[in-house]
Amino acid sequence: MRKLPKFILTVAAAGALTVGMLPLSACSSSGKEVVLRVSNWEEYIDLGDWDDDELIEIDNPYAPELGGVIGINSIVDDFTEWFNNGDHGFNIRVEYSTFGTNEDLYNRLNLGDTYDLVCPSEYMIMQLVNEGRVEKYSESFHDKNIQTNYYARNVSPYIDGVFTENGWKEYAACYMLGTTGIVYNPEIVSAEDVSSWSVLKNPEYKRQVTVKDNVRDAYFATLGILNAEELLGESITSARRSELLNSTHDDTIAAALDILKDIKNNVYSFETDSGKADMITGKVVANYQWSGDGVFIMDEADDDTNNPTELWYSVPDECTNLWFDGWVMLKDGINGDEQKRTAAEAFVNFLSRPDNAIRNMNYIGYTSSIAGDPNEESSMIFDYLEWNYGAENDGNTTLYDYDVSYFFGKECSVAADIETLEIGDDGSINRGRQLFAQYPPKNVIDRSVVMLDFGDRLSAINQMWINVRCLDVKDFNPAVVWTVVSLIVVGVAAIVLYKFRYQIFYRTPKKDNSDK
Amino acid sequence: MKVKLRFSRSQLCIPYAAFLILFVIAPLLVIVYYAFTNGQGHFTFDNFINFFSNTNTIGTLLYSMLLAITATLICLIIAYPTAYILARSGFKKQHVLLLLFILPMWINFTLRITALKEVLSVIEGNISLHPFLNSVIGMTYDFLPFMILPLYTSFLKLDKSLLEAASDLGANKFFVFLNVTLPLSVPAIVSGITMVLLPSMTNYVVLDMLYNSTFIMGSLIGSYFSAKDWHNGSMISLILLIIIFIVTIVTNRFSDKDTDARRTVL
């Protein structure tokens, strides 16, 4: 105890020394350099280093000397170089870090990490906006007349519409988007079965389907099953659809719990990442996926040297969750610093430059929000789409005009191989391969729902999810319970017997000892 | 000189004292604070009541105990004869043999479980059909060395003259084992049990990797924390801590009692 004050003093002195030096060293190293702290999902940006044969052969007005689009350096390095070569009056350095889940990011922000620019999903953006933590984009960011405002000029008019409609536009710039659906092996799972979310609890595929280990996705699919009848009806409106799939009433939650328990007893696993590998290797026949990961799985399964499999992606008939990841600036980080704001907005714009959007899209498999300026004659993104998915009419292939007009804001369609799409009698397309997963057709978008933040119902839904995953005492097998109880009784009896063995089995061993 | 020596000795404690305060006592106080407060920071017993009034959380406690007890028993059944044979065999290369059992500990845990998963898939086909069995195998695989090591050391240290004395006094091999070897190895059994039982109640990574979708205590705490519910999560951590504390006290009593017993036997 005597030494404690001395010890505290030492620690305090050391602490003071370190703290005192921090600002000093920060000052000396940065100079005029502004540090932009960016946090993004893991593996959610192009890291460059492509092989030469990965060149995307389309016209690239931003770097004609490359003869196409190719990632040589990482996007972050390219951005730093691009920005510092520009006429901004200051230099920047990007501190890039990653997070695993939205909740992970949120917890980190609450624990005191500060970032200037982050890329959470729409519901987390809503939560951060509601908590007043998000810095609005500047007026000039949305000015289409400025040449370097690549986001404002190139964002898909459809996405822009969704963001305006939901009131997100001034806070967030969409980065990637996608749907949710089911990747399946068409040789084993029938199209009819995967046309409904209830495939997750279909006993025919017992322990052969994986589901995302994430309450939002699991809950969404469950609501799809729960409201299947009304969702499949003729008279459903998009407002009603949104209402049904965003319901957080106690009754809905209780009903969802029962369905989720069924699903739990039927699935192979609730997975965070292992589902991709299990699907590719054929351990499971169907898995609940986000569209971008679906594209990745289909690509990998096609290229699997041992056992190439043709997998498909299905969007169930009931509904699909249209989700977005967007860039938001945080007040804590920007802290009124105009230079930081400029740098953050420039970062978003650089990512939105069509060649960079293609690099990211090609690298990570998701769908970029960038479509290209609808008023311009050609769009690089559309060129990429054609280069990637367009089929040649070589006599054996039947072509189908795959319509993506809604996304590009002008009449356009890709000539796709009809074999990669399942076209219904009414012309709707509900299942298909990579093209279908990456750029969903209009009829899928029409039944898509944006899943909003749960708000103050979050804890009730989290508790429901915990209850699903826990084993209820009432669900225990009575035989097991009695075995355990009897084992414990026997164990306790054995311990007691052992402890008093001298009193019970031996007469008086202690006396013998003392006699000696 | 003497004063100086003492001074440096107490200073030697500082690193550990600092560690203890920073990483054990302070977090523990934080856990206790969170366990008995609600979102508004008011004192409450609700978290405690929540745990014991929910059949799902009670079920989880039972399930984890069942899993942990089964894994521990299997570890004991495998480890006891193994350690006995290893230590008592006249085999000259017994260190090499021991190494074979310890070697898996040198390989990264995730890698081992991934390998186990593939092996089980080959044997069982679809591994998600036997979640409980797989979890028990995973835990046993993971914690077996922790059971073997203390037993092995205790058998090595065993005084051979005691065994000879027992045989001289007419005990056959079975009674020598029952009356001498077994009582003397009880402290080792106890320390082995503590080292296997407690981690296997919470090590949910094994369950996740082997596709057991049912929560055990560790995953329950983790899911409360990731749902930003620090209060219920802390309460469950605290309850687990108390259970562990009771188990430790009981087992320590048990092994202390046994040192007395050993003296009596002697």
Image (spheres, helix red, strand yellow):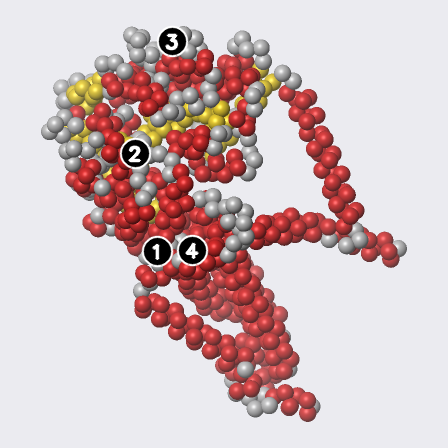
Q: Nearer the viewer, mark 3 or mark 2?
A: 2
Residue A114 at x, y = what percent? Answer: 55, 30
Q: Residue furthest left?
A: A425
Residue B217 at x, y = what percent? Answer: 45, 55
Amino acid type, callout 2? Asn
Camera sees residue A236: yes
Query: Which one is nearer the viewer's eye here, B163 or A506?
Result: A506
Residue at the image point whose x is 45% and y is 48% from the top: B224
Both on one chain, marks 4 and 3?
Answer: no
Residue B216, which numbered label? 4
Residue at the image point whose x is 33% and y is 62% from the top: A474
Mark 4–mark 3 distance (CA, rounded to whole Å): 56 Å
Amino acid type, callout 1? Pro
Residue B164 at x, y = what percent? Answer: 60, 81
Left or right, A463 with reference to A8: left
Mark 1–mark 2 distance (CA, rounded to whole Å): 30 Å
Amino acid type, callout 4? Ile
Residue A321, which numbered label? 2
